[in-house]
Every structure is written in C-alpha cells, then in structure tokens.
Amino acid sequence: MTGKYARQNAFLRLVSGNGAAYGSDFRYSLFPTKEVVIGRDPSCQVVLDAMMYRMVSRRHAVVRPLPPSPDSELGWVICDLNSANGTYLNGQRLQGCQQLMNGDRITLGYDGPELLFECEFNHQSTVISSIAEATSLPPAGYQNTNIPDSSVSFTQLFPIISTGKDLTRKAYLIPGVLTVVFVVLMFATVGDPQANQVVVGTYIAFAAYYFIYQLCGKRKPWWVLMGSGLTTMLILLSPLTDFFIFFFREVLPGSLPANQQESVTFTELLIRYFFGAGLMEELLKALPILGAYAIARGLSSPWRERVGVWEPLDGILLGTASAVGFTLLETLGQYVPQIIQSVTFQAGDGAGQLAGLQLLIPRILGSVAGHMAYSGYLGYFIGLAVLKPRKSWQILLVGYLTAAGLHALWNATGTINGLLLVVVGVLSYAFLMAAILKARALSPTREQNFATRFLGPK
C-alpha cells in the first residue's frame, strides 16, 4: 500500500568485507533528494577504510535518486565513477548506470566489499518522514541500533540457501571438498604405505600449488594446469629424458658427483650442478609452458588466452604446475623408494616406511622454495617475452640462467651447510614472490584478476 502517508525507505547494508567480518550490520540511509558517493575519500557519504579496502577507489561509485514521478514509486540508480577495479551489480560488471531493485548486491571491485540495496515502506506520518529527511547521513561505520529488528528471515536460519555463487567464489568450497576427499582416501589407504604416500604427497603438492595460485590471482582452467604437470611427468618417463641427461651431463660439464666422498671444490660442484641439474631440469620443466604457447597460437579467442601464455602470470601458473608434476614423480619414484630401501636394510620395514614419510613431506612442501620457485620464476620470463616480443631472446636468457643458477646454488649448498641451505631457500622463495608481484602489476587483465585487492587502485 502506497499513498500520502506511506514512504519508501532505502538503505545500503554492508554485508561482506572486513567491516562485516564479525557480524556488524552497517546501514547507510538513502534519501530522495541526495546522492550518495561510495569510496575511500573522506568527502564521500559512504566512506570505506582505506587500509582494509585498497581495491576501492577514492570515489568509486554513486547512488542517485531518480526524479520523482506521481505515477511511480521512488527509485535509485547505481553508477560507476570510472573506478580502477570496476563496480559489479549482482556479479555483472556495471556499464554506465543501472536502476537498483530490492535485494541487489553491489560489489566494489571483483572481490571487494559488498553492499546490499534494501528498500521498505514506512507507514509513518509525514511529519516524522520530513524530520528524517532533514537529518544528515550517518557517518561511515554507523550502526543503526535506534530501531530494534527482532525478525528472523528464512535465509538467516538457513544461510546456505542464500549464499549462491559466494559459496564457491569466496568460501573456498572446492578446496574444502578436495580436502575431505583426500582425507577419506588417506583413511582408505591405511595399511598400504605406497598408496598412502601417493595420496599424502599429492594432497600436499596441490595445497602448495593452491597457495601460489591464490597469490597469482588469475583464473586459469584447472585442466590446463593439470595438463602442464602431467606433461612433465610423461616427459620424465620418456626417452627424451635420457637425451637430456646425455647432453647436459656427458657433452656439457654437468656430471654429478658419484658419491659424497668424491673430493671437489664448491666452485666445481656449483658448475656441475648448474649444467647437470639447473640448465637441464629447468629446460625440461619449461617444455609444457612452451607447448601451451605453441598450441594456443592456433586457437581463436578466448580459448587462445585461456590455454596459452600471453603474460607473465600465465607463465608462472603453468611453470609452477609443471614443477608440481616434476616434484611428485621425482620424490615418489626416486627419493622415497631409495630411502625406504636403505633404512629397511638397516633397521627393518617399519623404520623404512617412517623414513619415507619423513622425507616425502618436506620435499614436496618445500618445493614452494625449490622446484616451484625456479620454474615459476622462469615462467615469468617466458610470459614477459611474449608480452615484449622485441626483447624476447634477452628476456628468456636472463630468466633461464637465473633460474638455473638458483637451482644449482640450492643443490651445491645442500652438500655443505644446512644453515646456508635455509638462506638459499628463502632467496629462491623471495625471487618467486617478487616475480608474482611484478606479474600482477604488469597483467593486461589486472582489473579482472581476483588478487588485485592486494595492489589497490591504479
């Protein structure tokens, strides 16, 4: 019922983001004669904290009242103010202005704070309404507690019904489901050490990779990433690996020490590992990245961009996925069986299986500062070479030699001092993180990437 004594009230309610993380219920009133600007600037009517919401522009969006009409109810429109990361209405990026409907969700940036538009009819006297309209807007962060709300909606009692896409997009549902699946598999393989090691190793590898994926902040199809890791595994099992070993360790000076008793200087050891491990393994792990780039060139958009390598973030994602495949096969197929066999011979089967598990966990988890760091770093340069083709060969050479050098330094240092090994591992991790940060800043799709909140507006 509308009429002389009925008035439509409208609010913006902050429903997600750091400000709403602890159940706060911030409501900002909308009035028929005033526009409301949302942003980080203190002059805005809805001011969001500059430290919490760096993806929000200083003046991000505005809610304007529609001109009053005797034949229609009062309405409001949302307009983007040319923000760096865009304004989204119900998950769709806003182009120009659009009228708001009750229940519409406004997101500032792709994965930024979310405001819910609510309108209701208030059957109070026009005197009270006039007083309310004359009152200035509440300050940012004001919590409306003047009118208690004791009603409980159906979706409040059963929140899973109303979360929709947010459940998969913001609540890490898929990682949670995979964790449950792997836990069940771990229980199912109790008593079968070999199968249990495969399950545990695979889960740790996926968890480590998911960490890198979230830092990169660019969506890439899961089957493309998995294909990169599986391709590396197939290469390792193919005759191509024998050719690599012959070329880098026999033709080039990359022969590795036969045992720890072999007397060689650190410099000589570093050179051997540079050719026999660094150059050889980094080139091998880079083959899936180069293959994805070559295959995608024959595809049409948008598959070309989804599958291939068109920027540094693509190279990092495919490179680290390739490293996961390399680490899993090398660890489960070589190092774990070797230590199990060695310890079993000395202390029995139980001690051997325990030693295998003790080696499995740090080798795969540590790949974030090992194989994933070197391959991801080289992948950055492959993507950068695609982005800047005029300097591609110089870029590729710098990346290849640097990744191989870090790899060699890790292997050589591991034979000398454990403390130095920590320093090299931290250094490799820092190189990868620096590459990810730079890749996010260079990304042509920066506004659509879900990690831009860490960088803030341009």
Image: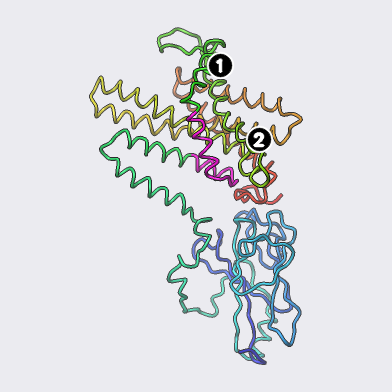
Q: Are marks 1 and 2 in contact (CB under 8 Å)?
A: no
Amino acid at pointer 2? Gly
Q: Secondary structure at mark 1?
A: helix
Identify the residue position indicated by label 1 in the image.
Answer: 275
Residue 290 placement (x, y as % from top left): 62, 31
Residue 452 placement (x, y as % from top left): 63, 49
Q: CA distance from mark 1 to mark 2?
A: 24 Å
On screen, 100 above or below 71?
above
Q: Is residue 189 magenta?
A: no
Quick one: label 2, few (<14), some, or many (20+) residues within 10 Å? many
Residue 215 placement (x, y as % from top left): 56, 43
Q: Which residue shows up at 55% across the image and 29% down it?
A: 428
Quick one: label 1, few (<14), some, or many (20+) residues within 10 Å? many
- Of residue 122 and residue 297, the one placed in the foreground of this image is 297
Q: Secondary structure at mark 2?
A: helix
- For the N terminus, the image quarter is bottom right
Residue 49 numbered mark, or none:
none
Using the rendered view, name the quadrant where residue 145 is placed: bottom right
Identify the residue position indicated by label 2 in the image.
Answer: 383
Amino acid at pointer 1? Phe
**Name of the residue lying farthest toward the top:** 263
Chief SS of the magenta region: helix
Residue 60 placement (x, y as % from top left): 70, 60
Using the rendered view, name the quadrant where residue 332 is placed: top left
- Span colored in magenta: 209-234
* Left or right of 313 in this view: 242: left
Q: Which residue shows up at 41% across the image and 32% down it?
A: 362
On screen, 26 above or below 401?
below
Colouring used for the render:
rainbow
Going from N to C along the chain, the mark reached first, 1 or 2, is 1
On screen, 419 above or below 151?
above
Q: Is residue 213 magenta?
A: yes
